[in-house]
């Protein structure tokens, strides 16, 4: 069986010789043997334990906490739970960083599209980025509710062509009209718009919003505060006041 000196063990674990010696004095890594000259010698099991100690130290556990864990009857169970907790914490941290990175990229792209920008315009873009998640959820909901309506449309058309029966198409038209009205009302009751001139956040009249020229993120409206008519940025507005 291999034997390792203090220096060899330190090198294999990426720590200093003084660290190995310190763990010995604290009683969490006692050498399994001594050479004839009195030098510490460590076994393969000692090497494994040293790697576990290094891992636990990376989790910011204190020497006393590590000592208590290693004295447990089944320390591997405690370590397994620690690994799961660390994995969860890191996953949450990564998700948080990715969300912040997405916001930064969105803000950066938004600023690039502006010929000139101010603190107000930066604020507008930041609000837009913050509301995108809610807007995406609403868009998905609208698509999902529209799938049965679209399926009924194709069924009624095929039924009319193949069987010559037209009433399913009339039924679809009625359902589509009701669905379109309800979805439109729900949509415009849950969005607002930012005026690019005065930065007012407003909700336009349903009729104006419905017929206005629009892009996926903006709609050509008249600001209720300054009267500017142009494309206003769409944001999540919550429920209707």
Image (cartoon, grey):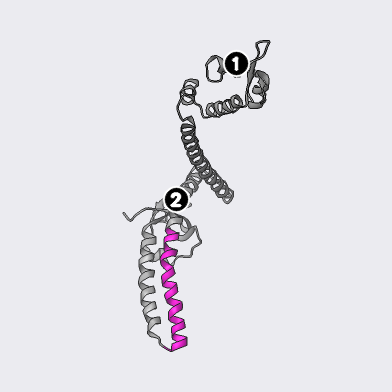
Residue, disc 1: 21
Which residue is most to the bottom?
164
Q: Quadrant of the C terminus?
A: bottom left
The image shows a total of numbered marks equal to: 2
What x and y, as percent, mark residue 124?
47, 48
Q: Is residue 182 magenta?
A: no
What x and y, as percent, mark residue 189?
36, 59
- Which region of the structure is painted magenta? 138-164
Q: Is residue 155 magenta?
A: yes
Vertical arrangement, residue 193 with respect to residue 87, above or below: below
Residue in the foreground of this view, choosing between 227 and 69: 69
Left or right of residue 144, residue 106 in this image = right
Which residue is rendered at x = 42% and y = 68% of the image?
146
Which residue is rendered at x = 36% and y = 74% of the image?
175
Left or right of residue 57, residue 207 in this image = left
Mark 1 or mark 2: which is in front? 1
* Secondary structure type for disc 1: helix
Label ID, residue 131? 2
Residue in the foreground of this view, choosing between 213 and 181: 181
Label 2 crowd (10 A; few <14 / some 14-19 / many >=20):
some
Vertical arrangement, residue 230 with respect to residue 174, above or below: above
Which residue is most to the top?
37
Q: Earlier in the sequence, mark 1 or mark 2?
A: 1
What x and y, as percent, mark residue 92?
48, 41
Which residue is rendered at x = 53% and y = 44% of the image?
98
Estimate the spatial distance between the alpha carbons at disc 1 and disc 2, rounded to whole Å: 55 Å
Label 1 crowd (10 A; few <14 / some 14-19 / many >=20):
some
Vertical arrangement, residue 222 with respect to residue 28, above or below: below
């Amino acid at each position: 069986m291999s034997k390792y000196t203090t220096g060899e063990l330190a090198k294999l674990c990426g720590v200093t010789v003084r660290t190995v010696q310190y763990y010995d004095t604290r009683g969490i890594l006692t050498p399994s043997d001594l050479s004839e000259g009195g030098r510490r010698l460590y076994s393969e099991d000692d090497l494994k334990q040293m790697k576990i100690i290094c891992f636990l130290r990376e989790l910011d556990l204190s020497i006393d906490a590590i000592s208590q864990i290693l004295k447990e009857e089944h320390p591997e169970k405690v370590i397994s739970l620690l690994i799961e907790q660390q994995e969860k914490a890191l996953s949450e941290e990564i998700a948080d960083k990715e969300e912040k990175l997405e916001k930064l990229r969105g803000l950066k792209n938004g600023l690039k599209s502006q010929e000139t920008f101010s603190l107000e315009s930066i604020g507008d873009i930041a609000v837009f980025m913050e509301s995108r998640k809610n807007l995406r959820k609403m868009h998905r909901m609208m698509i999902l509710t529209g799938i049965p309506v679209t399926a009924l449309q194709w069924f009624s058309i095929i039924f009319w062509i193949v069987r010559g029966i037209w009433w399913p198409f009339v039924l679809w038209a009625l359902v589509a009209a009701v669905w379109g009205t309800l979805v439109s009302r729900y949509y415009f009751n849950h969005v607002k718009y930012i005026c690019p001139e005065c930065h007012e956040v407003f909700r336009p009249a349903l009729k104006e919003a419905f017929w206005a020229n629009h892009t996926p993120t903006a709609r050509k409206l008249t600001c209720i505060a300054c009267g500017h008519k142009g494309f206003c940025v769409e944001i999540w507005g919550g429920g209707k006041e």
